[in-house]
Amino acid sequence: PKIIKLRKTDEGAEPGTRVKILGRVHRERKQKGVLFITLRDGYGYMQCVLSGDLAKTYDALTLTRETSMEIYGELWELPPGAHAPGGRELHVDFYKIEPHWKAVGGEDAITNKVQGGGDPKGLLDMRHLTLRGDTASAVMFVRDAVESAFHQAYKEIRIRKVSPPALVQTQVEGGATLFKFDYYGESAFLTQSSQLYLETCLPSMGDVFCIEKSFRAEKSLTRRHLSEYTHVEAELDFISFDDLLTHLEAIICRVLEITLADPSAAAHIKALHPEFTMPERPFLRMKYSEAIDWLVEHGIPNEEDQPHAFGDDIAEAAERRMTDVIGRPIFLTHFPVAIKAFYMQKDPTDLRVTESVDCLMPGVGEIVGGSMRMDDYDELMEAYKRVGIDPAPYYWYTDQRRYGSSPHGGYGLGLERFLAWLCKQHTVRDCCLYPRYMGRCTP
Ligand code: 4AD
Ligand code: MG
């Protein structure tokens, strides 16, 4: 009979067809002289059954996990309730293993025991192999779907994609976390955020977004800080602060909708985070000053172990405790000028605070930071002075306030934090391919 090459095991093929598949041994088990192999090809898993003489060859008897195989056989549909991926199995009649395809063995301990136990440092050193495990790869599949969903969601509302530079000479979020390097004898930085560049696109391109890497020399080790992370940023022209919040809520929910409409992504999310439900809209809106009161009422102290007071930074631990107790997405708004970035617009009704927002999610805390931008030239010059920034390298940013200013605002969303929330991962380190943080730049 005709052989169909199943390039991807998630492609449909009728029961009864003879197929050829290529992949790696994810698991194998022997039972009464029959060898069951779960073959993995990056698209799914296929249970392959080798019986009789096929199970007694040297290759079959010495088979190791992760070995690559070319397998031929007939597809069988299994009765409902059978424990095989996709309710089918392949009755193998021939297989081939090139000599150098054989894996050295022992990887099973790494690839399939990523969760629980295990030494995290060892697992991270072996990230190239742990990525082959069920959990690690499921998170990467969801990540792929979420990134596409952001593209689609922005396109649906006609926001254009741009690609700002990564090598820059201006800071955005403070000098303390800048990665500095020698740029042909001048000093330059790895970008902390594309925001300032996005702002320059508004006058010609309308609303814009980008999905680029941002870099932060974070000198502390936490479960939600990376040195290199993927930053989803958007900038919107002629909007009000309220428009910004409404947009943000809509984009987050639309991205979730698109992602969950993808059956494979939905299945992975279900497995990783069974109790996940779509957030209710509108998100809870809470002013910074109300959060301070909330923290005092709930006896959650600040970093000096004192009751929180207006003007304090809300540290990671306190923020997460509050978010976990409230148990739903929160828009935390109107942070004091002194603890926020120089470019943030002040609230005209209370000049102590800014038109700023952090979106907080249970289990993670802040996943988005955004604000309205200062659009007045004199005020911006004043702000540079306040934080001690030399305005010279910012001439191009300042010029936006000289050549047709506008009320505008935007935000940045940490993709790894979004995924940590969606996939219920303890740390953002498990939400990117090869995490970078203080002390780790390998593999
Ligand atoms: O709050 P941040 O620092 O805001 C900005 O960079 C703005 N300029 C963005 C903008 O308005 N266009 O960072 C935005 C988000 C955070 O909420 C967080 O999700 C993520 O980026 N983030 C990090 N993610 C992982 N590791 C880090 N070190 C991160 N720093 C920020
Ligand atoms: Mg922030």
Image (cartoon, rainbow, N blue to C red):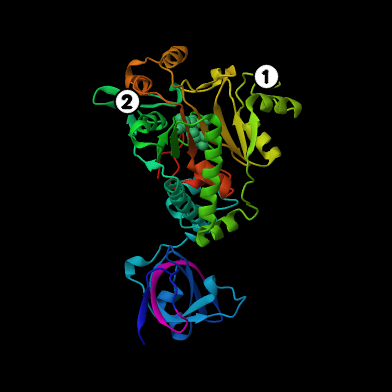
Magenta span main SS: strand
Instruction: Please report whichever mark, 1 or 2, sits nearer to the chain's N-terminal start.
Output: 2
Quadrant of image for the C terminus: top left
Which amino acid type corresponds to the residue marked 2 in the rendered image?
Ala
Residue 209 x/y as whole percent: 41, 39
Q: Which mark, residue 373?
A: none
The residue where tag 2 is placed is 188
Does residue 165 appear left or right of residue 338 in this picture? left
Front position among marks 1 and 2:
1
Residue 274 x/y as whole percent: 63, 56
Residue 409 x/y as whole percent: 47, 30
Compared to residue 273, the image places residue 334 above or below, namely above
Give the magenta range: 14-28
Quadrant of the rendered image containing residue 260: bottom right
Q: Is mark 2 on a helix, strand or loop?
A: strand
* Residue 228 visible, this orientation: no
Residue drawn at x 61%, y 77% is 80
Q: Which mark, residue 309?
A: 1
Which amino acid type corresponds to the residue marked 1 in the rendered image?
Ala
Compared to residue 276, the image places residue 323 above or below, namely above
Quadrant of the rendered image containing residue 159: top left
* Residue 249 visible, this orientation: yes
Q: How far apart are marks 1 and 2 (CA)?
A: 37 Å
Does residue 436 appear left or right of residue 368 in this picture? left
Q: Which residue lies furthest to the bottom in this view?
A: 1
Residue drawn at x 54%, y 27% is 356
Name the residue nearer the viewer: 393 or 234.
234
Q: Does the magenta stretch include residue 10?
A: no
| Residue density around tag 1, few if under 14, some if 14–19, many if 20 or more, within 10 Å | some
Q: Residues at badges 1 and 2 in contact (C-beta under 8 Å)?
A: no
